[in-house]
């Protein structure tokens, strides 16, 4: 794995271009499409280092680009770039859309825009996230929030980074709330965990349980329970708000579960019903066994079933009927097994507790969207910020602290709503952000990460706090200069020699400050 990583790191833009052109040789793409894809690649290459520096929790650039190449190779049979006044662009305008995706044909039609085409490639390549059988009800909601969040996450490199600056393009973020939820999850468990979850193609691995186990091990059981429960509720909340079918699905699920609980609460009647069911299944197995051991009965059953089925669904032969009967017999045996389990005292109690938990969960869902979703997202962020402080406390190296400084800064700049409210400015989160900054700066001092501008701890904290409000991409270039003007003390923050911002220092006492300081040691 390490050897592969070293090989990938030797790639440069020319190598990427050659690699993409080889893929495109096998595709029937127009010259306009090929040029746009090459332009998209150039933008990724141009902005990726700044993106990685600012965000930290990202994949290796080569892995990112290779993954995109694989998507184009495997999932895109046709990409039509709709140039101005072309037939394709007229169709898009008539339908009042920016793009069209035909999933089965693996076809994309989109206006000539690198960000838009990349988004279409990601959409076409998205797949349903596998969920274990016992949690199948969550599949649509979890898939939606992970795939949508992952798309916005990957688009960010060309959306917000141009090789010179970091500028969050609000109008290009398709779902602000989903983005905050995804980024919170990303910073809690890491990109590698998230990508394994999204790419998981087996329902044997329960990533919801793995998520809970990870948080429990690192941040405690209470936070694990709270975070995972809230994450699942928010995933359902998001999909219900957009999808009428999902709203109906969860309403029906809540009704069905409440009915099951009522049946379980009448223990005597429930056990009587299960005993009757068991007898019914046993009798059906006996009937199947008779048919399997009697050719005449088999023939009659074959004729009887085929007389009721349309031509395309008719049973091909008696041997196929035998296979079907054996399958039905196995299913009935499973039903009997379940009845036996529920009739047993321990099995009954376990099932009742499980259904009670389901009812509790389903009742707690806000299907009618009565509570402002921002409040729920804020609660999720609060849990994360508590966990973040634990990460800081456990940190032992300079690099860990430097990474955490960048991560907390990035997290604070996440936009929650259309009013452009940044997370660090949300009233309910301000104290937690302040505490996280304080913990980081204290640990940075202990590990000799940041230069002390003054021996006065409070003033030093005020000066260093500006790091978290700076959008300077490489904080290692940050230099501060102190100046006195009209009897007031000012701190000037430079990106090397370029002045980024000036802050008046609120101080009612005399302090000794270093005139010019490079903040990162």
Image (cartoon, rainbow, N blue to C red):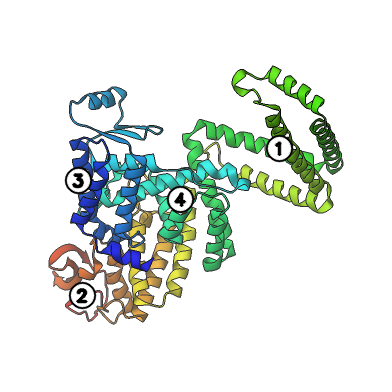
Which quarter of the figure is the N terminus placed in? Answer: bottom left
Which callout, 1 or 3, points at the residue further toward the start of the chain?
Answer: 3
Residue under label 4, please give it: 198
Determine the image quadrant of residue 468.
Answer: bottom left
User: Where residue 203 appears, x then y in whole percent?
Assistant: 56, 49
Q: Nearer the viewer, mark 2 or mark 4?
A: 4
User: Where residue 34 appears, x then y in whole percent?
Assistant: 21, 40
Which callout, 3 or 4, points at the residue further toward the start of the chain?
Answer: 3
Residue under label 1, please give it: 327
Which callout, 2 or 4, points at the residue further toward the start of the chain?
Answer: 4
Q: Please, what secondary structure does the residue beneath circle 3 have? A: helix
Which of the two residues, 322 or 355, is positioned nearer the viewer here? 322
Q: Please, what secondary structure does the residue beneath circle 2 have? A: strand
Q: Please, what secondary structure does the residue beneath circle 4 have? A: helix
Q: Which mark is residue 39?
A: 3
User: Where residue 473 appears, x then y in whole percent?
Assistant: 24, 61
Which of the two residues, 109 or 57, is positioned nearer the viewer here? 109
Determine the residue positioned at 49% across, 54% down. Answer: 379
């Amino acid at each position: 794995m390490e050897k592969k990583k070293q090989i990938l790191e030797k790639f440069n833009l020319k190598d990427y271009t050659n690699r993409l052109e080889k893929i495109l040789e096998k595709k029937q793409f127009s010259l306009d499409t090929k040029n746009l894809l090459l332009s998209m690649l150039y933008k990724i290459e141009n902005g990726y280092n700044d993106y990685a520096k600012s965000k930290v929790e990202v994949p290796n650039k080569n892995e990112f680009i290779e993954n995109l190449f694989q998507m184009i190779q495997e999932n895109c049979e046709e990409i039509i770039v709709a140039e101005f006044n072309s037939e394709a662009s007229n169709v898009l305008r008539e339908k009042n859309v920016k793009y069209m995706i035909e999933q089965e044909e693996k076809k994309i039609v989109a206006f000539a825009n690198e960000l838009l085409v990349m988004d279409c490639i990601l959409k076409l390549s998205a797949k349903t996230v596998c969920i274990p059988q016992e949690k199948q009800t969550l599949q649509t909601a979890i898939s939606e929030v992970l795939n949508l969040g992952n798309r916005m996450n990957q688009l960010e490199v060309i959306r917000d980074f141009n090789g010179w600056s970091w500028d969050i393009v609000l109008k290009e973020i398709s779902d602000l709330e989903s983005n905050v939820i995804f980024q919170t999850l990303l910073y809690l468990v890491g990109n590698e965990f998230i990508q394994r979850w999204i790419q998981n193609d087996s329902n044997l691995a329960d990533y919801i349980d793995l998520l809970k186990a990870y948080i429990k091990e690192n941040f405690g059981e209470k936070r694990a329970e709270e975070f995972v429960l809230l994450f699942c509720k928010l995933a359902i909340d998001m999909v219900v708000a957009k999808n009428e079918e999902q709203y109906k699905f969860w309403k029906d699920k809540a009704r069905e579960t409440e009915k099951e609980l009522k049946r379980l609460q009448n223990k005597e009647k429930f056990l009587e019903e299960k005993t009757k069911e068991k007898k019914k299944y046993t009798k059906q197995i006996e009937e199947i066994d008779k048919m399997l051991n009697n050719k005449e009965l088999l023939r009659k059953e074959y004729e009887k079933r085929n007389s009721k089925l349309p031509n395309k669904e008719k049973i091909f032969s008696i041997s196929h009927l035998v296979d079907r009967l054996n399958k039905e017999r196995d299913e009935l045996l499973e039903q009997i097994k379940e009845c036996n389990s529920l009739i047993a005292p321990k099995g009954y109690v376990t099932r009742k507790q499980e259904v009670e938990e389901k009812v509790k969960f389903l009742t707690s869902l806000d299907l009618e969207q009565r509570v402002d979703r921002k409040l729920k997202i804020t609660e999720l962020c609060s849990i994360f910020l508590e966990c973040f402080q634990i990460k800081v406390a456990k940190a032992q190296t300079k690099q860990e602290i430097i990474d955490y400084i960048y991560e907390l800064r990035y997290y604070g700049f996440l936009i929650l709503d259309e009013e452009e409210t940044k997370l660090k400015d949300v009233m309910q989160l301000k104290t937690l952000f302040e505490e996280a900054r304080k913990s980081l700066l204290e640990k940075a001092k202990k590990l000799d990460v940041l230069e002390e501008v003054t021996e006065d701890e409070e003033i030093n904290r005020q000066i260093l706090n500006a790091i978290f409000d700076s959008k300077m991409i490489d904080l290692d270039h940050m230099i501060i200069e102190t100046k006195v003007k009209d009897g007031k003390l000012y701190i000037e923050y430079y990106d090397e020699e370029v002045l980024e911002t000036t802050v008046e220092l609120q101080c009612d006492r005399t302090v000794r400050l270093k005139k010019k300081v490079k903040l990162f040691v």
